[in-house]
Amino acid sequence: QQPVQSPQAVILREGEDAVINCSSSKALYSVHWYRQKHGEAPVFLMILLKGGEQKGHEKISASFNEKKQQSSLYLTASQLSYSGTYFCGTGPSGNTGKLIFGQGTTLQVKP
Amino acid sequence: ETGVTQTPRHLVMGMTNKKSLKCEQHLGHNAMYWYKQSAKKPLELMFVYNFKEQTENNSVPSRFSPECPNSSHLFLHLHTLQPEDSALYLCASSPTSNQPQHFGDGTRLSIL
């Protein structure tokens, strides 16, 4: 049931790009992406509610492939502030609010 | 300031104690959540409340008892906890369910 994120960890230099994947063995109806810095609360990045939907937020964007039961988070021209752990949360059909989170992907951006 | 405030920030208690965690949000949201975050484990949903009604209990042991007296406040009552319950407990809220969640800073709980 828990979505699987890959890679588990990635180290980048400033300006490099990264892709984080979130895959589920069950049908996806919604995908949430959050970032958590060490010792801080998770912060919402974006939500995708439809298959094939793509969203962008500055240099961070995401896609949702309903057929592949997968979502990907794209970070372009990474900045030091992008460092943290990224979580995807997958939601069931309906509006129960129940999210199941992946194990997280730790991203470290170095100067 | 995230708009979601949790108290206390840290709590140390014995296994026979009774304590409560408090969560308050000033965002006008109608859905509230409790999560458990253990080291090297994903965020685990515990409970969901929509318009003060509990809509999800993710098979949480009865030693955890939630209470939602109104849409702005959420409590987690703790009693007879086990050492494996030591974790960061996060509260979140959203306008309605399946919308972006705003998290509090969490309560770091240690069971002796």
Image (cartoon, coloured by chain):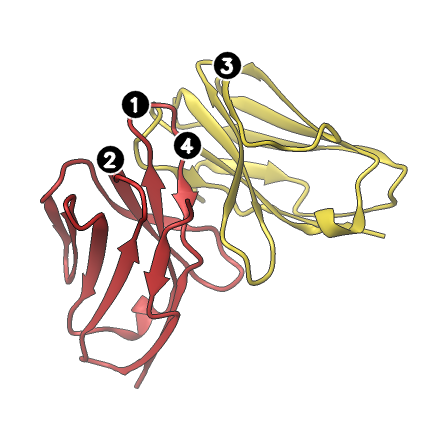
Q: Amino acid at mark 4?
A: Lys
Label 4 belongs to which residue? Answer: A98
Specify few, some or many for label 1: CA neighbours under 10 Å numbering under 14, 14-19, or 20 or more. few
Camera-side residue of A91 and B65: A91
User: Is B59 on the left-hand or right-hand side of B80?
Assistant: left
Nearest the camera: A79 or A75? A75
- The N terminus of chain A sits in image quarter: top left
Label 3 resides on the chain identified as B
Mark 2 lies on residue: A29
Please tell me whether mark 3 sits on a helix, a strand or a loop.
Answer: loop
* Residue A38 tag number: none
Badge 2 element: loop
Q: Are marks 1 and 3 in contact (CB under 8 Å)?
A: no
- Which numbered circle lies on residue A94? 1
* Residue at 21%, 57% in the rendered image: A72
**Residue displayed at 25% across by 40% down:** A28
Mark 2 residue type: Tyr
Left or right? Give the position of B27 relative to B39.
Answer: left
Numbered circles on residues, count: 4
Chain assigned yellow: B
Chain A, chosen colour in render: red
Q: Which residue is mark 3?
A: B52
Query: Residue flagged by tag 1: what amino acid is it?
Result: Gly
Measuring from the top left, give residue A103's x and y in whole percent.
44, 58
Q: Secondary structure at mark 4?
A: loop
Could you give the CA–CA distance between mark 4 and mark 1, rounded to whole angstroms?
9 Å
Between discs 2 and 4, the one toward the N terminus: 2
Residue at 14% from the left image edge and 58% from the top image edge: A58
Q: Specify the subunit that label 4 lies on.
A: A
Q: CA distance from mark 3 to mark 4?
A: 15 Å
> Which one is in front in this view, the residue at disc 3 or the one at disc 2?
2
Marks 1 and 2 in Cβ contact (< 8 Å): yes
